[in-house]
Image: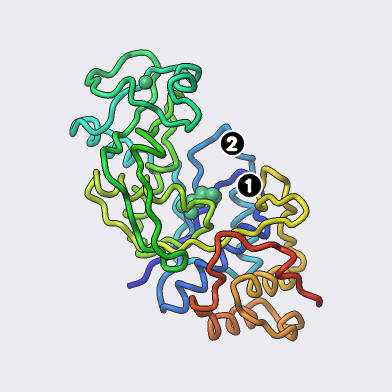
Amino acid sequence: MYVGRFAPSPTGPLHFGSLIAAAGSFLRARAQGGRWLVRMEDIDPPREIPGAADDILRTLETYGLEWEGEVLYQSTRLTAYREVLEFLHRAGLAYACTCSRKEVGQAAGPGGVYPGICRGRRERPSQPHAVRVMVGDGRITFEDALQGRVSQDLARDIGDFVIRRADGLYAYQLAVVVDDAYQGVSEVVRGADLLDSTPRQIRLQQLTGLPTPAYLHLPVAVDAATGQKLSKQNLAPPLDRARPLPAIVQALTFLGLNPPMELLDGDVASAWAWAMAHFDVARLPQRRTVLLDEVKIRP
Ligand code: GLU
Ligand code: ZN
């Protein structure tokens, strides 16, 4: 059974860039006759905006993006993350790192790769410390369903990476791997801005014995004027709940479909029904970025 998911972080309202990831994963799951889940990645309270999680879910509803089952909140999953962390510790695959940010910066050099200063340490210091996982040797290579073959040398390009921060918060990389497995996700469809994280996630799956799902990384929307991807950080405008159809039709255009402009006069359910009948991975732009200007619609 195909299981897909959309996993927003409640750091602000959904914008057009998030809609691409939501719509792409939704259509892919539905076109396969599969399930589509929503997971709220609320494990970083300092970055959260109060009310954003509810706001995101309300927007998904208004946009007709209906998920199955209950929303999984990562804040309820800390025990599971701790168990995996303990397993890695016991297996000698993770270690406490007491380096300060400054020490890491100095040791890492220009590439930003942590050189494993604390590697080999078995005890857990009582002072606050990060936990790093050992990446080992060799390249990670996987076939992305859209971007093709992707390969990364983790030791050279990333280094032993943090799976629990010194402030006690679990890292995205760990939580995402544990929960994709827990929810039985068979394919991860998300933005190509996360392509760089995937080899780390595959290494964690290998080290913990969790399954590796298939991956499809959609291009991300880039604003032509600034050359930057749409994000909450650069204040992409929130999706308009009062008028979902223009953004939906634009998202379908972005995803390589050629939606008839009559969809704008219908309702969201008819727009998705049309999209499900026409969605085709072969029509997705095989790129990591698409300029927003390329997908302007003229309603
Ligand atoms: N929560 C992540 C984000 O909003 C996405 C995680 C994922 O899809 O793996 O950027
Ligand atoms: Zn260290």
Name the one closer to the observer, 252 or 140: 140
Identify the residue at horizontal 25%, vertical 48% (top origin).
206
What residue is pinned by disc 2? 47
Q: Earlier in the sequence, mark 1 or mark 2?
A: 2
Residue 173, x across and y down, in percent? 41, 43
Quarter holding the C terminus is bottom right
Residue 40 seen by the camera: no
- For disc 1, the neighbor class at 10 Å (few under 14, some 14 to 19, many from 20) is some
Identify the residue at horizontal 39%, vertical 64% (top origin).
187
Label 1's element?
Answer: helix
Amino acid on which disc 2 is placed = Arg
Pointer 1 residue Cβ closer than 8 Å to ligand 1:
no
Residue 34, x across and y down, in percent? 40, 74
Quarter holding the N terminus is bottom left
Residue 89, x across and y down, in percent? 24, 30
How much space separates mark 1 and mark 2, taking CA atoms? 11 Å
Name the one closer to the observer, 255 or 277: 255
Q: Nearer the viewer, mark 1 or mark 2?
A: 2
What residue is pinned by disc 1? 52
Amino acid on which disc 1 is placed = Ala
Residue 105 seen by the camera: yes
Colour basis:
rainbow
